[in-house]
Structure formats: structure tokens, C-alpha cells
Image: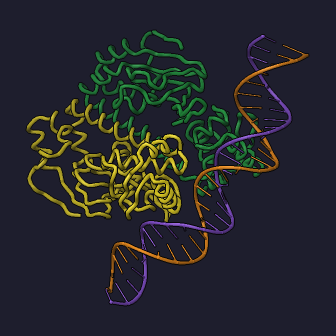
Chain colours: A green, B yellow, C orange, D purple
Amino acid sequence: MKETDEKCNCEGCELKSLFFSNIEAYEIERICRIKIEKSFKKGEIILKEGDEITNFIYLKSGMVKLHRNLSTKKDQIINITKLFDFISLFSVFSETKYNYSVSAIEDSVTCNIKLSEIRKLILENGKFALDLIQKMSKNTDRIILQSLELKQRNLNGRVAFILLYFAKEIYNNLVFDLPVSRKEIGEYINMSTENVIRTFSEFRKDKIINIFGKTIEIIDLKNLEQISLLG
Amino acid sequence: MKETDEKCNCEGCELKSLFFSNIEAYEIERICRIKIEKSFKKGEIILKEGDEITNFIYLKSGMVKLHRNLSTKKDQIINITKLFDFISLFSVFSETKYNYSVSAIEDSVTCNIKLSEIRKLILENGKFALDLIQKMSKNTDRIILQSLELKQRNLNGRVAFILLYFAKEIYNNLVFDLPVSRKEIGEYINMSTENVIRTFSEFRKDKIINIFGKTIEIIDLKNLEQISLLG
DNA sequence: AAAGGGGTATGACAATTATCATATTATATG
DNA sequence: CATATAATATGATAATTGTCATACCCCTTT
């Protein structure tokens, strides 16, 4: 992990709309001084279950997984998410310690702002508060709904669903590189590694997808959507 | 459903702390005028998937289930919750229409405040905004974590978990009346009705619980906790 | 070059869970 | 009060899913 303490270069940041469109110039100045950018290499842990919650963190670039430990050998993945998402997501305003971890699954950059500063902004700036509530709601909604969608499906349906999630929501492309191993996909959609691999193979045999290592190509979108719908 | 338009009688309401402790007297007056209390009989629908989101709703008394329709015959229960919970919970600030329904599983009373008024309060009153964010976070956190806990467990574990949820979180008692049918429990913890019944029977045979119709008595708490932990 | 580890892959088998059938009891409704 | 309907209950069986074993490949480390 590397801290960059450069000058405020948030012009390119999409979250500017949240943090800056409603904020007076002098407030921007303050946020700029106090925000800390951190870089993480693929595989590095951004925050760990049990860590004190002191900062409001969002993902400026890269991709991360939210996960929690079930036992020495087993992990449960809560969400895989990309650009401009809040990653210190839930719990931030309701707990003192994280009950989940966040790890970089690609080289990532986070922007960190002291929670106390965010609290101050909420107290002082109603427009900011309202925007923040909306952004946070979108995020938690997404997690809840995805979890509900996944758990009603059988194995085929779950694999189809998650492939479509990667293609449509994450990569916006029918060809993409899986950012995680088959094992991690299993931890995400709640099935054994072997069955993830097996289902991939079946989809390949049925000419629904092509597989080249981590690279997936969806070749029969309609069929995959149907499996996700019915499965 | 019955609307009661009586004078402001919110003194006994626990949510007063949220709505009133941070609000000036004239604001209280306004909220009082605009809030609408509604009563629902057991089984009545409080709000329906697809309804326009116009009000901020919380449960003043009774018990409700949040659920969504999967097909003509199948329902998925998202959460069962009681006194003083937000029930127009997620989506309120991020969608225009509800993507879930809420039904009364006991006679219930809701308090309804126009969303526009809540928005106004957020904009004008930072302390209120911060409290609201915390309350909402607690609620969505609870749903996400319960969902994660449930889906890692096998059937025995899930049934044990949900019985403990009722005993500890909802009724605060080792003896309680199930507020829902076995079918609904299955929809909640994602298993077939038959297996819910079967698991209940097994727990009874193993002298972990007693069953008298809807009444459940936990007689071997330690064992049930162990099953919930390991299952 | 050898050894070890993790990821991918596949088959065989075991365990879990759902479904179907049927019966009984409760509850609602005319 | 009778009758339909839903809820509870249990057994038998089928379908789904997980586990174990094995193999291969691709790294990294020694």
C-alpha cells in the first residue's frame, strides 16, 4: 500500500458530483487537504474485519471484493465491485468496527476521508447529506437485491447470473477476463469450486460460452439470459 | 386498512428520539399535522411491489414481513421485523417504485410521512440527517448480515438460526408463537416447506424444542445454538 | 531440474435437499 | 353444521449439490 499526498487532483473523479457539487469553495479546500489517496496492488488487503472504522472510503479506480471470514479455510464474498463505489459501505454509520474485509482484486486506488469530516459535512450541508443518503442506499440496495436474486437460483442459474453480472455491470462487454478464481466465484455465489468449474465446462460444451483460462466469451447471450431467468 | 387522523400522540413512540429530539418546536408541529397513522389487520398488505414510493413509513406497532414475488406460486421473504423498524426501508431514496411488498403478519400500525417532508428535514436539519443515516444503516446492515449468515448454513443450521432469531431478537423469550406458517419460514430461509416441518419434528424428537401448533418452546438452548453455529 | 502449491478439470460417489404422494388436523366459509 | 381449503406431518423417491480422488498445468522456490 502506498499513500500519495499530492495536490488535490479530483477533477477527474466522478464522485466529485457528490462531494463537490454541493459544497462551498472553502469546504472543497478543506476536503482536499484532509483526503488521503492510497494505492493497493492486486491481492493486497484494503481493510480487515475487526479494523476500527475511522474513515469513509471509496474506490477511485480498480476492483475490489468485500468478503468475510467463515473459518480458517472458508471465506464468503459479499460483493465484487468496481470503479467509484463506496467500499466502506455498510456498517460505517452503525458500527465501530468493520464486520467485513475489503481486498484489491486488481490494482486499486482508494480515497479516504475521516469519518468525522463526513459527519461534519452532513451536519452542515443538507444537500450533501441527501446526496450521500441516495448514493449509500443505491449501494446497499444493490447488495441486498443481488443476494436475493442469487439465492433463489440453482447452480446453473447462479453461474449464468454472475457471468451476466460481470459482462453487463462490470465490464460492459461480452468478452472479459474473470477478475477472480473459480474458487472465489464459488464463495461469491455459494457453491463448491468443483461445481463452478463443472458448470463452466457444461456451458462451454453447450456452446453458450468460450473459455480461455480466465477469459470468458459469451457466445449465446439469449441462452445464458434464459438460464439465469429460469435457473 | 384504517386511517386515524387523531391529534399528535407520538409521546409514546420510540422513534420520537429520531424525529423530535433534533427538531425545533415549530417543526414538530408541522410533522404532527402531516403524519398519517394507518392500522392494518393481520394479513393485510401495507405496500405492494410496484407501488410508487411517496411516503417514508415506519412500523409503530405490530409485526410485518418484507417480501417479493418470484412467480405466481412462489414468494421470497426478505425480512420479518417488529416494533419501530423502518419498513419502507431500502429503495426509498434510490428508487421511485418499491421492488418489494410489506404485509402485516400481526395487527400493525404504521406512521407515514411524505418523503418530500423527510427530504426537507434532511436538507434543513443536519442532526436529523445524521441520525436518519445511522438508523437506516443499522436496518440495511441487519438485513445483509442475516442474509449472509443464513446462506452459509445447511437446513438444520438455518432452522436453528431462525428459531434463535425469533426467540432472541423478536420475542425475547424462549417460548413464543411463530408469527408465520412453516411455508413462510421456508420462503424466509430458503428451503422447502416439507423440510422445515421435518426439521422441526427432528428437533422435537431430539428434545431441543417443544411444539404445540404455532407455539415453540426452546428447551435445549445450548444445543440449538450449537446447531446454528456449526450447521 | 526437482519439488511444491495453487488453479483448473473430470469422474465417481456420498450427502443433502426437493418433490411427490398421502394422511391428518385445523381453519375458514357458506 | 358441512364442506372446502390451508396447514401440518411423514415416508418414499428423485434431483441437486458437495466431497473425495486423481490428474494436469503453470508458477514459484529451492
Q: Position of residue A87 (x, y in %)?
A: 46, 29
The correct choice, above or below, for A223 with respect to A200 in the image is below
Please give left or right for residue B75 compared with residue B2 in the image. Answer: right
Q: For the image shown, how many numbered marks are present on the structure?
A: 0
- Res A65 quadrant in image: top right
Task: Please tell me which residue lies in front, A64 or A28.
Answer: A64
Task: Please tell me which residue lies in front, A151 or D1.
Answer: D1
The correct choice, above or below, for A100 with respect to C22 in the image is above
Please give left or right for residue A36 compared with residue A131 in the image. Answer: right
The correct choice, above or below, for B147 with respect to B102 in the image is above
Q: Position of residue B112 (x, y in %)?
A: 22, 51
- Res A201 quadrant in image: top right
User: Which residue corresponds to the image point at 22% horizontal and 34% vertical from the top-left?
Assistant: B128
Task: Please tell me which residue lies in front, A198 or B229.
Answer: B229
Q: Position of residue B225 (x, y in %)?
A: 44, 43
Task: Please tell me which residue lies in front, A217 or B5.
Answer: B5
Please give left or right for residue A126 compared with residue B138 in the image. Answer: left
Q: Position of residue A174 (x, y in %)?
A: 66, 41
User: Which residue corresponds to the image point at 32% horizontal and 51% vertical from the top-left?
Assistant: B53
User: Which residue corresponds to the image point at 65% horizontal and 53% vertical from the top-left?
Assistant: A222
Screen quadrant of the N terminus of chain B: bottom left
Q: Is residue B57 at least partly visible in the picture? A: no
Please give left or right for residue A229 compared with residue B84 in the image. Answer: right
- Res A92 quadrant in image: top left
User: Which residue corresponds to the image point at 59% horizontal and 33% vertical from the top-left?
Assistant: A74
Q: Is residue B48 at least partly visible in the picture? A: yes
